[in-house]
Amino acid sequence: MNIAVIAPGEIPVPPRVGGSVEHCITEITKRLSASNRVTVYSRRSAGYPASSRQGALSHVRVPGGGAGRYLGHVLGRMAGRRFDWIQIDNRPSYVPRVRSRFPGTRIAVFLHSTTFISPPRTTLTQAARQLAAADLVVANSKSLAAQIRSLFPGVRHKVKHTPLGVDVSQYKLPSASQRAAARREFGVSGSFSVLFAGRLIPKKGVPVLIRAMKLVRRSVPQAKLLVAGGAGNASYVRGLKQMAARYGVPARFAGYMSRKRMPRLYWAGDCFVCPSQGHEAFGLVNVEAMASGTPCVASANGGIREIVRHGTTGRLVARYRSPEAFAEQIQIVARDAKGSAAMAIRAREDVVRRFGWSSTAARLAGLYRQYRKRRN
């Protein structure tokens, strides 16, 4: 198949900083191009060539300047080319213009959240019209797919899902020396290190985790909190630091973490906690932690429930607004070192079996082959 992938356009592909959607595009297209021709259209950025090609994977980078101008540049570069599929990542608003230029080409929208199909970004009426112009709507989890079907019953027959993945050669079990070095690097040697990784925004639940840590330290006095992640709001991060100090919770805020350092970050943790308070479409950090052999405690919320199997590959917190509920599960991980280590091994095996990027690309290609001859 010949597949075009249109990135959102705010940041380049591959992303230099952040960019979870762009990271997914990078990893999926790398594998998708093993048996298909793939062209990725993204924003031009200093240090990246305007175009490049490696095997069957091509990158075309165009000027930004706002969504409308960016998409115009993309369509200009696509003119005269024929594709079996055009995949638009997380920007359903692009579909009508792409459809007008390519009326006979199959179009898929790959959604990573409901952000761009619901208020305040758009109205449900507008989003319904945009999704109706696509042939396929791909969600990154069953949970997100169910939300989309509920919001837009008129396109429910077009909605499918394929889970995201992780590079299991990069996120892997550490040796004893690698683990010790990582713990020194992040300043948690000699402690029971409880790790959070993610954006520092309210819905990610760090305040709940800080309150839980105060309770954990009653029975695990060596417990220390390690927080990694960037934030657009410096005052919010300041508030988290003040809260940790007020609750007597030793905490290190490591700031933004490059993808290169992420595996070592997970190795530094004795327990990874994902206390999300809002719906998580997928929850990729849980997959990364599990692949790295770090026991995982997470909110029983959205797509996370499709990743973590309670008591088998991690621990799920049903009452995820409760610090006490999180504290209980963290304490179980701390008390039962042998059981937690066995759970971490099972989690790694499960990730390798279900969540490699190659599996994601294969599922996506399978959907495209299945729907290649259909027009809805």
Image: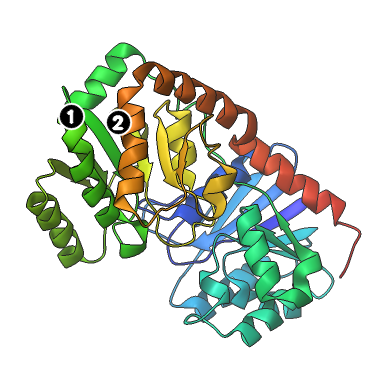
Residue 145 in view here: yes
* 158 or 316, nearer to the observer: 316
Which structural element holds mark 1?
A: loop
> Could you tell me if the residues under marks 1 and 2 are in contact, i.e. CB atoms within 8 Å?
yes
Q: Is residue 254 left or right of residue 301?
A: left
Disc 1 and disc 2: Cα gap in Å?
A: 8 Å
Amino acid tagged 2: Gly
**Circle 2 — which element?**
loop
Where in the figure is residue 277, as x and y percent of width and height?
A: 40, 59
Percent x, y of residue 163: 62, 47
The residue carrying pointer 1 sits among few (fewer than 14), some (14 to 19) or many (20 or more) residues within 10 Å by Cα, namely: many
Count of numbered circles on the image:
2
- Which residue lies most toward the right here? 373
Between residues 76 and 289, which one lies in front from this camera angle?
289
The residue indicated by pointer 1 is 188
Give the x, y percent position of residue 236. 20, 64
Q: Please say whether residue 55 is visible from this viewpoint.
A: no
Q: Name above or below for residue 318 compared with residue 45.
A: above
Q: Label 2 neighbourhood size at 10 Å, few (<14), some (14-19), many (20+)?
A: many
Q: Is residue 50 above or below residue 67?
A: above
- Front residue of 272/367: it is 272
- The structure residue drawn at horizontal position 30% and vertical position 42%, both measured from the top left corner, is 327
First-in-chain label (1 vs 2): 1
Q: Amino acid at mark 1?
A: Val
The x, y position of residue 48, in whole percent, is: 43, 52
Task: Give residue 269's mark.
Answer: 2
- Depth check: give the residue in front, 325 or 373: 325
Which quadrant would residue 281 be assigned to in this image?
A: bottom right
